[in-house]
């Protein structure tokens, strides 16, 4: 009986030891992920990828959305502080208006890593990881000219003015398209990255400019709204549309011949990278990258390579 009892005690001790080693080596803590609006597949992917990467690295993670509202964003930062988050991954609501929210988190001792959009202040966030919007816009505009030709009338759908990406993309389009004097921009409307607004603004633009032959858009959602309006008006066959993001619906539109191209933002790459840099900073006090602002080049999706789209916002080699 003595030997049997000793064996049982040893077995129990071994089991307890194995349980300890099976558990995470340390209580990694919570990473709070704050995105814009997950009804847009781009921001949905951003949150999903960041959460999955955080959990893979041993953290708990939650995703919340401010939907472009700085007051909501500020409240979500307060929640992250209350929950003693070890890091915050934030897609800022406003280039200027989000500075205070980031400052609040930093003052509470929580490192902040920005993804997709920038704030107009350096030295607060540990990193700002964004698509190379100027490069992507030039890429898209060149493809757009190839699709529409070097003459005609076109309109532009502009994203949210509070987001620096909107102006950067518009500037990138302008830099390329002004090289073609016979291409005339006859209208521009703000549609705030939104499909419904893209649809409504496209209807207005068509009423004022019924003879256009091109639409260049700051993102896919606005472009898809424009396509719906053009279909309804019976004009899609005569109007070429270009997008920006690389969303699944845009890729389907490229396959169907309704959209000429979309510029893929590598959101799946830089969302994961932001979490990796947060993990590095938590453990070592350094992100492992020398610069705060980091640009990730965009990729062009056309009918020629659309079949290489292997997952949301991922283009295989």
Image (cartoon, rainbow, N blue to C red):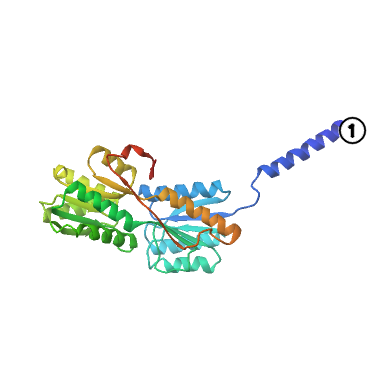
Q: Quadrant of the C terminus?
A: top left
Residue occupying image coordinates x 56% and y 48%: 57
Within the image, what quadrant is residue 178 found in? bottom left
Helix, strand or loop status at disc 1: helix
In the rendered image, the vertical position of residue 67 relative to residue 2, given as above or below: below
In the rendered image, the vertical position of residue 301 relative to residue 123, given as above or below: above
Residue 275 x/y as whole percent: 51, 53
Q: Quadrant of the N terminus?
A: top right
In the displayed image of the protein, which residue is found farthest to the right? Answer: 2
Residue occupying image coordinates x 35% and y 49%: 40
Q: Is residue 312 visible?
A: no
**Does residue 14 appear left or right of residue 85 in this picture?**
right
In the rendered image, the vertical position of residue 245 relative to residue 254, given as above or below: below
Q: Is residue 107 visible?
A: yes
Residue 252 x/y as whole percent: 29, 39
In the displayed image of the protein, which residue is found farthest to the front? Answer: 179
**Does residue 27 appear left or right of residue 98 in this picture?**
right
**Mark 1: few/some/many CA within 10 Å (<14, 14-19, 20+):** few
Within the image, what quadrant is residue 236 found in? top left
Residue bearing the label numbered 1: 2
Residue 173 versus residue 113: which sits nearer the camera? Answer: 173
Residue occupying image coordinates x 53% and y 69%: 107
**Does residue 94 appear left or right of residue 167 in this picture?**
right
In the displayed image of the protein, which residue is found farthest to the left? Answer: 211
Residue 222 x/y as whole percent: 26, 51
Residue 136 x/y as whole percent: 32, 54
């Amino acid at each position: 009986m003595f030997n049997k009892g000793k064996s049982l005690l040893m077995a129990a001790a071994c089991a307890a030891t194995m349980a300890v080693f099976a558990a995470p080596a340390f209580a990694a803590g919570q990473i709070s992920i704050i995105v814009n609006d997950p009804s847009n597949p781009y921001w949905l992917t951003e949150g999903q990828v960041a959460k999955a990467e955080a959990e893979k690295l041993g953290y708990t993670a939650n995703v919340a959305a401010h939907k472009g509202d700085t007051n909501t964003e500020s409240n979500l930062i307060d929640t992250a502080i209350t929950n003693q988050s070890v890091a915050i991954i934030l897609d800022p609501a406003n280039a200027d208006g989000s500075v205070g929210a980031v400052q609040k988190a930093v003052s509470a001792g929580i490192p902040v890593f920005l993804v997709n959009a920038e704030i107009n202040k350096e030295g607060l966030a540990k990193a700002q990881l964004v698509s190379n919007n100027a490069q992507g816009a030039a890429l898209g505009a060149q493809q757009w000219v190839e699709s529409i030709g070097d003459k005609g009338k076109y309109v532009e759908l502009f994203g949210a003015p509070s987001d620096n990406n909107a102006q950067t993309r518009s500037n990138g389009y302008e830099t390329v398209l002004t090289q073609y004097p016979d291409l005339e921009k006859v209208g521009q409307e703000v549609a705030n990255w939104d499909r419904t607004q893209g649809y409504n603004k496209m209807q207005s633009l068509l009423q004022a400019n019924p003879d256009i032959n091109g639409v260049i858009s700051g993102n896919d959602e606005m472009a898809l709204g424009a396509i719906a309006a053009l279909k309804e008006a019976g004009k899609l066959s005569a109007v070429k549309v270009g997008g920006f993001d690389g969303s699944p619906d845009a890729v389907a539109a490229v396959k169907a011949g309704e959209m000429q191209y979309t510029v893929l933002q590598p959101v799946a790459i830089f969302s994961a990278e932001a979490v990796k840099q947060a993990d590095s900073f938590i453990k070592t006090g350094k992100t492992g990258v020398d610069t705060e602002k980091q640009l990730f080049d965009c990729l062009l999706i056309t009918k020629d390579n659309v079949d290489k789209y292997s997952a949301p916002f991922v283009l295989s080699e």
